[in-house]
Image (cartoon, helix red, strand yellow):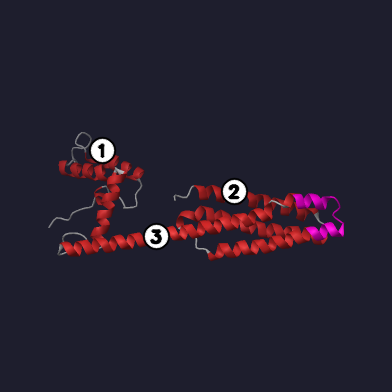
Amino acid sequence: MAITLTHYQVLDLQPTATQAEIKQAYRRLAKEFHPDTNRVSSSHEKISRINAAYEVLGDPQRRRSYDQQLQYAEVGYSEAGVRSRKERTEAAQAHYRKQRQAEQHEDNQLKLWLKAHTSINRVLNQIIRPLKSQINELAADPFDDELMENFQTYLEECQELLGKAQKTFQSTPNPPNAAAAAANLYYCLNQLSDGIDELFYFTNNYDDHHLRNGRELFRIAEGLRREAQAAVREIPR
């Protein structure tokens, strides 16, 4: 009994192949088996299968439909695996429900994450934006006890806010399609933590080195925050 190959197997590809890879594979095989270029290995039947496979896989819409047929076959939707129309319908419905549940779960995860991101971003603004004015106020007289106390109060508030942001970030699972934004947020939070530490060192010893380090770490954190926002805008809704 002849083995029926899938279109992916005909083109020697994995089902995860990109459209560019499909096109490259088709061109390579069409050239290899075309009688004008290789009379030894040419085969009318082989070329027909290659062309038929590319007609389906080369069209994204037809490919999606074909992929769905392969999925149905895996869950027992094929004629050989299902005995009756009722069983075929039940198998298809079960597969559809499972697929919809997975999609809904992903959608819910993304909605929760986006809500958490909005909350975290609001907190980051409360930490980062006041730094310049706080340093300017302290610069009037860094040795003034009241001014230094106000600056330390600001840093303590930053620590408290950062703790809340970190807790929110850690308690919310990151969906795969939000990976880039989540990575930028993670590094942003780390940079702010180190920056606050550097500014606290400055309040203890008045060493400008720590002040410069703190400001630079805050600057890097702000850049990462903006990159996270840009990545969020690219997430498909």
Please rate how many residues cluster around mark 1, counting C-alpha atoms within 10 Å: few if below 14, some from 14 to 19, many from 20.
some
Q: Of callouts 2 and 1, which one flags the residue occurring earlier in the amino acid sequence?
A: 1
Q: Residues within 10 Å of mark 2 (few under 14, many from 20)?
A: some
Question: In front here: 62 or 24?
Answer: 62
Q: Position of residue 63 (x, y in %)?
A: 29, 47
Helix, strand or loop under label 2: helix
Cα gap from disc 3 to disc 1, whole angstroms:
44 Å
Q: Mark 3 to mark 2: distance in Å?
A: 29 Å
Whichever of callouts 3 and 1 sits on the residue coming sooner in the sequence is 1
Q: Residue drawn at (23%, 64%), measured in percent from left and top? A: 90
Q: Is residue 46 above or below residue 199?
A: above
Crowd class of label 3 (few under 14; some 14 to 19; many from 20; radius 10 Å) = few
- Seen at 73% across and 58% down, the residue is 198
Tell me if residue 78 comes above or below residue 27 in the rendering: below
Which residue is situated farthest in the top direction here? Answer: 36
Residue type highlighted by circle 2: Arg
Image coordinates of residue 10 in percent, x first then y, are: 24, 49
The tag on residue 161 is none
The amino acid type of the residue labelled 1 equals Lys
- Rendered location of residue 195, percent (x, y): 70, 57
Range covered by the magenta-colored residues: 133-150
Q: Is residue 147 left or right of residue 229?
A: right
Mark in front: 2 vs 1: 2
Q: At label 3, which amino acid type do we have?
A: Gln
Q: Which residue is mark 2?
A: 226
State how far apart marks 2 and 1 are (Cα).
48 Å
Q: Nearer the viewer, residue 109 or 56?
A: 109
- Residue located beneath label 1 in the image: 31
Q: Are marks 2 and 1 in contact (CB under 8 Å)?
A: no
Q: Which element carries disc 1, helix, strand or loop?
A: helix
The residue indicated by pointer 3 is: 104
Considering only order in the chain, which callout, 2 or 3, is on the residue closer to the N terminus? 3
